Image: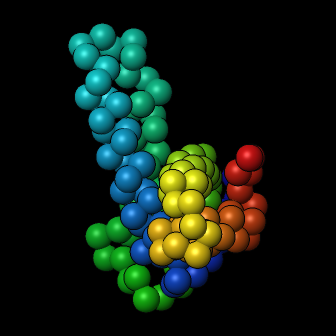
Amino acid sequence: MATQIVTVPASFVAYLEEALLTSLMGAAATLADCGWDPQYYATPLRNFDGYRRLMDALGWDKLDRDADLALDLKGNRTALTRSLKEALSLERNLMADDPHPRGSQHLTARKNADAINSFAATASLKMGR
């Protein structure tokens, strides 16, 4: 499979890192809730590993949050899409929780949701509804 490079704009790098860390922590919590029965580990472990690989692909340990970033979607598309869907759901919930369309929380969540949708469209990610 050929590389599938997408540019992550500098303005979105820090948000993407935060979204991935949130997804990684969620996957870790799900793993912790699996108990001792290995039959329940497969999906949460696959999700955790996908987020970890994506963080590695981003170069999370030396990430320049002020520069555009080239990201190879090969092998990372599923984890990226899943993480951004989770982030978009959170932003929509924050908008719904703030009944004032001009409220600070609503405006910030709207800005973040727009950034997610814009990047997802640029990267040709299938976000669904």
Q: How is the image coloured?
A: rainbow
Q: How many marks?
A: 0
* 25 relative to 81 in the view: left or right: left
What residue lies at 35% left-to-right and 68% top-to-bottom?
60
Q: Is residue 11 above or below residue 30?
A: below
Q: Residue 107 falls in which quadrant of the image?
A: bottom right
Q: Nearer the viewer, residue 101 or 18?
A: 101
* 124 relative to 40 in the view: left or right: right
* 22 relative to 69 in the view: left or right: left
What residue lies at 46% left-to-right and 38% top-to-bottom?
47
What residue lies at 58% left-to-right and 75% top-to-bottom?
102
Residue 100 percent across, percent down from the top left:
57, 67
Q: Nearer the viewer, residue 58 or 109?
A: 109
Residue 123 percent across, percent down from the top left:
70, 65
- The reply to whether residue 105 is visible in this rendering is yes
Residue 26 percent across, percent down from the top left:
36, 42
Residue 16 percent across, percent down from the top left:
48, 66
- The reply to whether residue 72 is visible in this rendering is no
* 118 relative to 12 in the view: left or right: right
Q: Residue 80 falls in which quadrant of the image?
A: bottom right
What residue lies at 38% left-to-right and 39% top-to-bottom?
27
Q: Is residue 87 above or below residue 12?
A: above
Residue that lies at the very extreme toward the front in this rendered image = 100
